[in-house]
Image (cartoon, grey):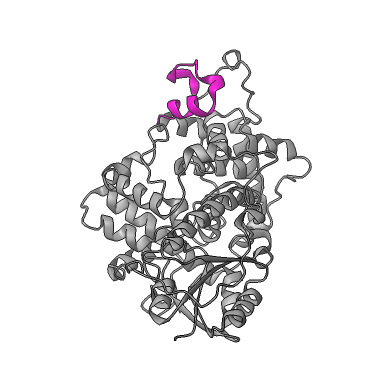
Amino acid sequence: MSKPQIVWLRRDLRMADNPALHHAAQAGPVVAVYVLDDERAKGHAYGGASRWWLHHSLESLGKSFGKRNARIILRRGDAVEELCRLAQEVGADTVHANRHYEPWWRKAQSELKERLDLQLYDGNYLLPPGAVTTGSGTPYKIYTPFSKATLEQLPPRDELPEPETLSSPDTWPASDALEDWHLLPTKPDWAGGMRDFWTVGEDAAHERLAWWTDRVEVYDEGRNFPSVDETSQLSPHLHFGEISPVQVWHALKDRRSAGWKTFEKELIWRDYAQNAICQFPAYATQSYRDEFDRIEWRDHTDEAAADLEAWQQGLTGYPIVDAGMRQLWQTGWMHNRVRMIAASFLIKHLLIDWRVGEQWFWDTLVDADYASNACNWQWVAGSGVDSNMFVRIMAPLTQSEKFDAAGYIREYVPELKHLPDSEIHDPADGRRGRYPDKIVGHKEGRERALAAYKAAKS
């Protein structure tokens, strides 16, 4: 009988179109394992919202394995050591895994390759990171030419079917109980809004894709209006690998609408973000542009502490910002247009370092992706390799009215729901009731930010 084949699961929690699982199932009995390794990621170990999603995703995938008389082994500790220990326990020589590009996983993959037969596959992106290069063979730094070159190389690979059967080892190794990892919040249980908002798992991801297939045509314009929210909400499913971008692309490829073309570019942005962290592994903690290290950011632990707390709690006095931050806290997700507004407000109106915001989003987003989160924050800040200019400061009140956010504000800032559309974006002082005043004026915040940037540049 063939030796057991270990499948190392990470952000690829699906049965179908999973290259590592597909190839392992063809080679012998499958022992799938998920190792909760918080130490390697250090400051980017999963935050609270991601841990909530991870629990339910592993639970869902475990049921899928159970239907095939198989199981997922759960271990906690150093991933390389646990995989080597497991290989010895079951008599395995080979570990199958889909490539991951976060710096800690790249290091772990290199270490594991020195100790076991590690077979790596490309499974989580449209095209393998590093496959799209300039004419001279160097990686792209700017998104637009990267996107054009990616489009020229599409279509992606074909989808892989889920294994019809999974052979089991003679005996199953020991496994942690998922409940013992305490990934779910209990004291207090703050996840009620997320339970109401999300259904987690591979089946839920495909149900969402089926719904999105009928809606993608309106995405080009609809994506900008948070009150109607014409977005796919596939991001956490893609992040945890409950569905692959290849599956999404093939499901939508025959669409001819502007909405699909715009959405396709969003899928390419995910590839671009991985391309960025392959070149700049510390992109989530280091500004690409040197002048941003000279900006005199306000101290978020001292002088700006109250402002940071107001931003986190959705009490800034700017309804569109506060609606977004409260949606984030309640659901673990925020509309993309509002993410940009809220991020810009923190960086420029409050003059707080973008990395503080990156960490807050990392802890509170269910789709907190190391590469995408970093690229998005550095784009808004103006500090990234490809980014908006710092001096382009989003006006939240104007954005709110332009993109008709009245309904969105009423949903997440109920203190203002009595106001008409003409007033709700920027309520007069006497009409705010219990809703707070602005913590900083738009003009004041803008001028302070521009002065700080000018000083850093000089």
Residue toward you, 293 or 379: 379
Q: Quadrant of the N terminus?
A: bottom left
Tell me residue 427's x, y (percent): 54, 20
Left or right of residue 427, residue 199 in this image: left
The residue depicted at 39 percent of the width and 61 percent of the height is 244
Q: Is residue 142 visible?
A: yes
- Rendered position, 271 above or below 317: below
Tell me residue 249's x, y (percent): 31, 59
**Image mark count:** 0
Task: Spot the residue most to the top.
Answer: 430
Residue toward you, 308 or 84: 84
Tell me residue 26's x, y (percent): 38, 79
The residue depicted at 52 percent of the width and 23 percent of the height is 426
- Rendered position, 424 above or below 6: above
Taken as a whole, is the magenta stretch helix, strand or loop? Answer: helix
Question: Is residue 145 magenta-colored?
Answer: no
Question: Is residue 414 magenta-colored?
Answer: yes
Q: On the image, which quarter does residue 41 sit in?
A: bottom right
Left or right of residue 54, residue 176 in this image: right
Q: Is residue 458 visible?
A: no
- Rendered position, 88 above or below 40: below
Task: Spot the residue most to the right.
Answer: 302
Q: On the image, which quarter does residue 24 sit in?
A: bottom left
Tell me residue 254's x, y (percent): 21, 56
The residue depicted at 23 percent of the width and 49 percent of the height is 257
Q: Quadrant of the C terminus?
A: bottom right
Q: Which residues are magenta?
A: 404-424
